[in-house]
Structures are given as C-alpha cells and as structure tokens.
Amino acid sequence: MIPTITRNYQNVVISTGNIINNELGQRKSNEELYDGLKITLHNDPKSESSVVVEIDKLHGRVLCATQELNSKLTENGRNEISIGAKIFLNKNSTECINQAVEALLNILNVTHVDNVVLAYHPNVSAVASATTVATTATSASVKSPCSEGSDSSVNDAANSWSARNGAQGIAELKLLYKALEQYADKQQIKQLGIADLDALALAELYQSAKVAPTIAQVNLAACCVVPAELQEFCRDHELVLNTHSDPELLLPEEQFSCLAPGYSIDWSLRYQVHVRCRGVLTAKGYIVGASQPGANN
C-alpha cells in the first residue's frame, strides 16, 4: 500500500479517477469499486501500467489520475455534459452526506452536479449484499427473467425497505435527505433522487421533503419486478423511475480493510458524466470516505 494512508490521517478520501481508462467501467459495481481502489492504493510507480496518483496531504486525500479526469470534464462545455452521482450510505450520518457532496464537487472541480441519488440501507439485507450483478440502469418497464413464475408478493415483503428499517429508518432517512436538500437550495445539486424505497416509505419521504425527489430507483435484483404501487406513485408524482442492480453494501469491511488496513469505510459514491447531445459516457469513477475507528463523523 502507498505510504500516504497512515495513522497521520484520521479521515481520508480516496478517488479512483476515471475508471473507463482502466477498462473497469463496464463491470459489476462492487468489482469496479474494489479494483479501482486497488489500482489507486497499491499503484506501483515503476510499472508500465502505472497511473498518476496525487497526494493531498493537507486534506488527507489520495487522488488517482485527476488531470485526466479534469480534461474529460472540460473537453465539452459544462452545459453540454450531465453529471450524475449516487451516494451509498449504510450508517446514519449527515456529516457523511456533507463529506460526500463536498468531495464530489471539489474533486470534479464543478460548481454543481445535475442529480444525486441517495441509497441508504442501515439494516443491510444479506441477500441483496451478496448480489453481484451489472449496474447499468434500465427502463422501469423491463422485467427480470426471475419474475416468471415467482411469488412477487412474498418477495416484495421480504425485501421491503419499510419492513426492514421501520419508523426509525424513515426518520433517519428524512434527516439525511434534508442534508442533501441544502445543496439543492444552493443549486449545487439540480435534482434529488432516492433508491430502493417501497411505495410506503417513498410517500412518507416525499410528503415531508422541502425539495421533492424527482428520481426513484428500484433494485430488480431484490424484487424481480417493479411493484405496481411504486409505479403508480411515481407516475402520479412525476418521478422518473429507473431500475438498477447495485448491492446494498457496495464494499464489505473485510474487503476494504485489505486495501486500507486500520480504516473503516464511511461512505462511497459513484459519478457518471455523459455528453448530453450524444448520450455518450465520457467519465465514470468512485470516491470513498474512510476513517480510523473512533473518528468523529
């Protein structure tokens, strides 16, 4: 491991840079993140395939190929590209939300992003966490082959966000979402979204939101077919409904500890940059926040 991740840093931020350059950008999301971090943290400067890793000692940041990423972001005008991000959070911490958004804006060197989707899973489903399937979002009307002959009502109940996280979970989610709303108020995030909620939880969040979500994501790996109630709510409230296959726990602690011993992962996010007129994906990467056990977050 590179000597920059040491006990000198209570908190660290790690950026994989543009993983499309490393040919990692079309894999399963957990594999993309793990391999992207491995390349960044275990880079051998003497290797022919070495990447440029920059160290921001002041802020405890390890940044992979930032110059290449910035060139991708500036080769088209800001109004010609769309930047979307998804924050993966498994613990209740508004500070983690703030850290993630600030790191996103700072590392991409932009004043705003077009959308941010929040995925919050305080009680991670073992089944969903073990799922390792492709991350490409598809239309909500597309059904998974596993829906054929399955008991969707049983499956939906087993994977209901509300059933697993309860009233405390929705209360925590509202506070986390409120932390995102402050960036929407400042136009630093143009659209807000939420992932994996059932219709009950989504309705409760929507009713309490100051800045209503405009994007909803549902995991077809968990429920196989989009529940009718969720489709109806999104249609009635003009939410764009997409499907995805990201695991609820993007990177288990044991995997991360192999890459950065002594640190625990606090949050992670994935960003994607598209050229609007052509819909071409020009940049994609991950940013991770980690801390030593006992650090304040």
Image (cartoon, rainbow, N blue to C red):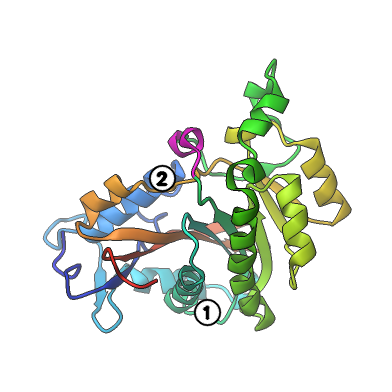
Which mark is in front, 2 or 1?
2
Q: Which residue is mark 2?
A: 30
Disc 1: which residue: 110
**Which quarter of the figure is the C terminus placed in?**
bottom left
Judging depth in this view, the residue of 239 and 182 nearest the camera is: 182
Position above or below: 89 against 32 = below
Splitting the image into 4 quarters, where does residue 155 fall? top right
Could you say whether the residue bearing mark 1 is in a helix, strand or loop? loop
- Amino acid at circle 1: Val
The verdict on residue 172 being magenta is no
- The residue under the point 38% across, 51% down is 33
In the image, residue 283 lies at what x, y percent? Answer: 48, 61
Q: Is residue 106 left or right of residue 49?
A: right
- What kind of residue is marked 2? Asn
Residues rendered magenta in the picture: 124-130
Q: Label 2 crowding class (10 Å Cα cut-off): few <14, some 14-19, many 20+?
A: many
The residue furthest right is: 236
